Amino acid sequence: MQRVWRTVTGFYYVCARGTDKQLIFETDDDRWEFLELMRDCCREAGVTVVAWCLMGGHVDLVLLDYEDEMSAAMQRLLLTYARRFNKRTGRTGHLFQNRFDRRSLDTDWQVMEAIRSVHADPQEAGVSLIERYPWSSFAEYLRAYDNDMTRGFSDPSCVLELFGSAKAFIAYSLSTPDGGEPGMPDLKETEWERHAFAEKLAKGLGVPLNELKTVASSRRDGIIFALHDGGYTVREIERYTGISKSTVSRIVRAYARMKAQAEGSE
């Protein structure tokens, strides 16, 4: 699988596709079986399913994975489901592509957009309206806002505060960001929100922003690059940490070279 720079937030977008555009679900029983396997495999690995959508030839997921267990959980899920599907249908060979795609989600905005995109997949494919498609976690989010404790296959609780309310979640989910009016223009990150998330990110790595200048350079440099890799500009990092722009730029360039060399050696 393609190497992915590990996100400091723990959130990832994941897509698994049928090989050669192979349909991976033929009946609703297939879909129920996949969902139950997904829940079991992720739960045992300590991976949280944040959002999901089952399409005919692929699966879209948003996962929360703090312990880097996602690959093992996904491999077990896809291999087990493929074996059962092939046995049931009498087909042979690979059901899924050898690699599943994943992308790190490094800001709250990216997490929100990934959830919107997962739920919007059926509508964008011309299959069904978002709110009427039965094979996604959209309805589970609405139940969560209603304090309905019925367990589904996702756990929206870790991201509900990003949207604020059921009305805001629906408005954002039904928005059309490409060429249309945004459903929630007030959700764009403010300077305060970006600073607050940078603080959260730095504390998650063990050092508050205002103490970054005082720690060992090796630790400081790693956190600065994590901030830059999470979407923060050199000027923002300078402003939030008090570390000079020239120092931040040097650290970012050095880590970028190391990352490129590591990826090139694989």
Image (spheres, helix red, strand yellow):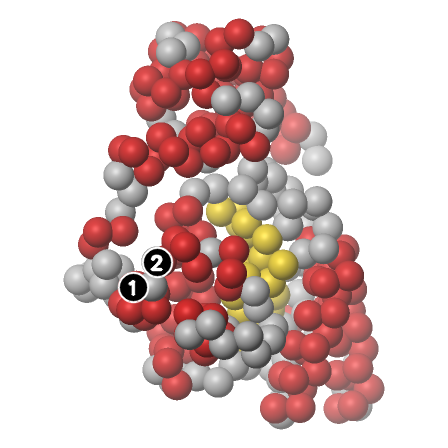
Q: Disc 2 designates what residue?
A: 164
Query: Where does the image place residue 131, in percent across and percent down from the top left?
Result: 37, 81
Quadrant location of the C terminus in the rendered image: top right
Q: CA distance from mark 2 to mark 1?
A: 6 Å
Mark 2 and mark 1 residues within 8 Å of each other at the beta carbon: yes
Mark 2: which amino acid? Answer: Gly
Q: Which residue occupies 39% across, 63% down?
A: 116
Secondary structure under the numbered disc 2 in the rendered image: loop
| Residue sitting at x 51%, y 61% | 157
The kind of secondary structure element at disc 1 is: helix
Q: Is residue 198 left or right of residue 82?
A: left
- Foreground of the two, 21 or 192: 192
Which numbered circle lies on residue 168?
Answer: 1
Q: Amino acid at mark 1?
A: Ala
Q: Which residue appears at 75% of the width and 65% of the height?
A: 41
Residue 84 visible: yes
Q: Position of residue 264 (x, y in %)?
A: 64, 31
- Measuring from the top left, give residue 126's x and y in whole percent: 36, 81
- The one nearer the camera, 55 or 206, is 206
Q: Is residue 246 above or below residue 122?
A: above
Q: Quadrant of residue 49?
A: bottom right
Examine the image and state in which quarter residue 113 appears: bottom left
Give the tally of numbered discs.
Answer: 2
State whether residue 238 is above or below residue 64.
above
Residue 210 lies in quadrant: top left
| Rendered residue at 72%/55% (across/down) | 46
Count residues near mark 2 (Cα–Cα under 10 Å), then give few for <14, some for 14-19, many for 20+.
few
Residue 121 circle label: none
Residue 115 placed where, x, y %?
Answer: 44, 61
Q: Residues within 10 Å of mark 1 (few under 14, many from 20)?
A: some
